[in-house]
Image: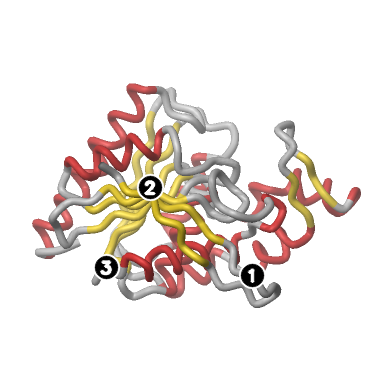
Amino acid sequence: MPETHRIPVANATTDAAPDVAAVHHEVDSDDWLVFCHGLRSDKSGSYEYRCQQAREAGYNAVRFDARGCGESDGEFVDSTLATRLTDLSHVVDYFDPGSYALFGSSFGGKVAFHAAAEDERVEAVATRAPVTTNGTFDEYRSAVEREGEWTFDTGERIDERFFDALDRYPFDDVVGSIEIPVAMFHGGSDDVVDPGDSFAAAQRLESDVLVERFAGEGHRFSTAGEERLLERLFDWLEWLTDRNGEV
């Protein structure tokens, strides 16, 4: 059975360290795949299914809630790109794999890219509809500049801290640092993150890059699209293993 862990995350601004909730789908293997959820998502739902499929494919799979999301401590407004990178780093250090692959969806794709640029243990990055340009959030930025914050229809808020952190991590940092294989899967009808952004990012990266456009799929994939995505993901990871002897 998957095991849930509470992982303390150091926070220099407070005396108390918030806990993030992580679930480990364990298998007797040295292969690890860590999943990063999107901006307003969490580790439940599709990530539970993805981890189950990863385990069946022979991977120790880990999914977690960034602070302010799901079952983790904190407020959503405190969850920025910088804090999500910190949360991911603590989760990985807690399980301490010798190497691992990352999968990130939407904003989680941006988290995965920048984590890979900083951690030499990352051996491959796969993403779905990754955010690769800060322009994706221009509408929210304008609202924050006018009103001081933006509130989503579900009540979650972001303020200037979100954009301060976003601006500290340009995609140029990834382009200049990442040398590992990358896969980007993108719905051709995505109206949240422009599919063209993935193709533009692929042209800039200097590593091996696979880009696949899923015709008819939006920002959220259909059940059939998700199945195709996972099939392609694990085929790609297997190909990397066969090519390199490890992932």
Pointer 1 residue? 16
Determine the CA span between mark 1 and mark 2: 37 Å
Give the class, few, some or many, for how many residues have Cα within 10 Å of label 2's Cα (few <14, many ≥20).
many
For image coordinates 30% across by 42% down, the residue present is: 51
Give the class, few, some or many, for how many residues have Cα within 10 Å of label 1's Cα (few <14, many ≥20).
few
Using the rendered view, name the quadrant where residue 222 is placed: top left
Tell us which disc is closer to us: 1 or 2: 1
Q: SS class of the residue under badge 2? A: strand
Q: Three-letter amino acid code at disc 1?
A: Ala
Pointer 3 residue? 97
Residue nearest the observer in this picture, 139 or 12:
12
2 relative position to 244: left or right:
right
Q: Three-letter amino acid code at disc 2?
A: Met
Q: Three-letter amino acid code at disc 3?
A: Pro
Pointer 2 residue? 184
Q: Position of residue 14 (x, y in %)?
A: 69, 72
Q: Is residue 198 above or below residue 12?
A: above
Decide which of tag 1 and tag 2 comes sooner along the chain.
1
Q: Do the residues labelled 3 and 1 touch (CB within 8 Å)?
A: no
Q: SS class of the residue under badge 1? A: loop
Decide which of tag 3 and tag 1 comes sooner along the chain.
1
Report how many numbered discs are placed on residues in the image.
3
Q: In this view, does 210 lie above or below 113?
A: above
